[in-house]
Amino acid sequence: MEDKLIKRVAREDRHAFNEFYQLTHKRVYRYLYRILRDEQMAEDVLIETYTEVWRSARRFRGDSQVLTWVIGIARNLAMNLARKKKINELDIDSVHNQLVVQAHCVEESERAELIARAIDLISANHREVLDLVFFQEFTYKEISQLIGIPVNTVKTRVFYAKEELRNTLKDMGIEKDDIL
């Protein structure tokens, strides 16, 4: 469906662009928010992303999935903004202290929230690769093309990202059996 829509967008079909946006913007926004950790910045980059999609649709060659191409545009814009604004990692100590207090009550919705917060505590490279694998459901090959690293490096990064997430959850007082 996305392939057909982007071809129509390339012909400047505004209705197709609106459909494409409605179909994809939530996934792109979630990805941007996980990188930037700021709603306003994520919304701004989302707008820039879809503006660029509109301008560049006719240059899409189909070498990857359409959403991979869009996420690539979003990633480049977000990384440029992050460098410009000098966005750094979270203050892990203050977040960690808050999470340890909350970790004792692990209900279904609270589990998801704690896992999301734990993901926020891991390194940016690991957070990004977990997002692309688990939330965006990209293949290792697609991630390799998107980030510009070899597939084996993606596999290694995913392995270490999972390990870092496991350790972070453990530091928060959450054992593997608590979240299953």
Image (cartoon, rainbow, N blue to C red):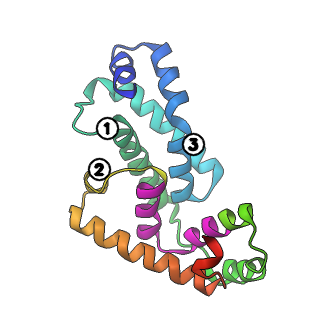
Q: CA distance from mark 3 to mark 2?
A: 25 Å
- The answer to if 118 sits in the magenta stretch is yes
Q: CA distance from mark 3 to mark 1?
A: 24 Å
44 relative to 160, above or below: above
- The residue identified by callout 1 is 65
Q: Which mark is residue 142?
A: 2
- The answer to if 148 sits in the magenta stretch is no
Kindly indicate the quadrant of the structure image that contains residue 109: bottom right
Q: Amino acid at mark 3?
A: Asp
Q: Amino acid at mark 1?
A: Gln
Q: Which residue is at a point 68% across and 67% down the rendered structure image?
A: 111
- The residue identified by callout 3 is 44
Q: Residue 108, percent across and down? A: 72, 63
* Range shown magenta: 114-134
Which residue is more in the foreground, 176 or 29? 176
Number of the front mark, 3 or 1: 1
Kindly indicate the quadrant of the structure image that contains residue 4: top left
38 relative to 59, above or below: below
Q: Amino acid at mark 2?
A: Glu
N-terminal-most mark, 2 or 1: 1
Q: Which residue is at a point 55% across and 69% down the rendered structure image?
A: 119
Residue neighbourhood size for the residue with mark 1, other residues' Cα within 10 Å, grouped as few (<14), some (14–19), many (≥20):
some
Which residue is more in the foreground, 62 or 73? 62
N-terminal-most mark, 3 or 2: 3
